[in-house]
Amino acid sequence: MKRKLKLVFWLFVIGFSLKILLESSVNTSPPVSTAPAKEVKADPVNTARVVCRMLVKDAAEYRDTVKFQNIIPEQTPEGDVIIKLNWSAENRFGTSVRHESLCIYDDEVTFFTVNDKVLIEKSKT
């Protein structure tokens, strides 16, 4: 009889512990929405700024030394974004050299210069 009571007691303890574990592991997070995501349009000025900064780093001899002093964005009525960038980068002697770039962006870079040297020039069609 004593053995039977001990067995019943331990079965009760194990059953109760399992019940608590199962209830605590149930996912209580809110349901995920299946509605279609809203279309987010990228800001053309910020996109142009990022793309032009990448072009500057590609044009620099030592891209990890590029430091931007001034970035001036301007949007034309036609939708083009003109970015003027003043930046510096080290040359092979470790001396910091100042540069000036002009970047025109309209869904892609159509014009890019470094110190008045044209590196990209695409005509609009």
Image (cartoon, helix red, strand yellow):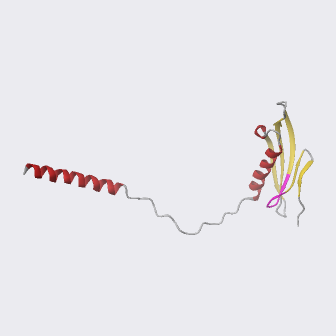
Q: How many marks?
A: 0
Query: Residue 123: percent from the left, percent from the top?
Result: 90, 62
Query: Residue 57: percent from the left, percent from the top?
Result: 79, 44
Looking at the image, residue 116 sits to the left or right of residue 6; the answer is right
Residue 43, by quadrant, is bottom right
**What span is colored magenta in the figure?**
103-109
Residue 123 shown in magenta: no
Query: Residue 36: percent from the left, percent from the top?
Result: 58, 69
Out of 74 and 8, give the one closest to the viewer.
8
Residue 69, by quadrant, is top right
Q: Residue furthest front?
A: 3
Out of 101 and 61, give the one closest to the viewer.
61
Query: Residue 35: percent from the left, percent from the top?
Result: 55, 69
- The residue positioned 10% from the left and 49% from the top of the image is 3
- The residue positioned 85% from the left and 64% from the top of the image is 78
Q: Residue furthest left?
A: 1
Q: Quadrant of the C terminus?
A: bottom right
- The residue positioned 24% from the left and 55% from the top of the image is 15
Looking at the image, residue 86 sits to the left or right of residue 43; the answer is right
Classify 70 as above or below 77.
above
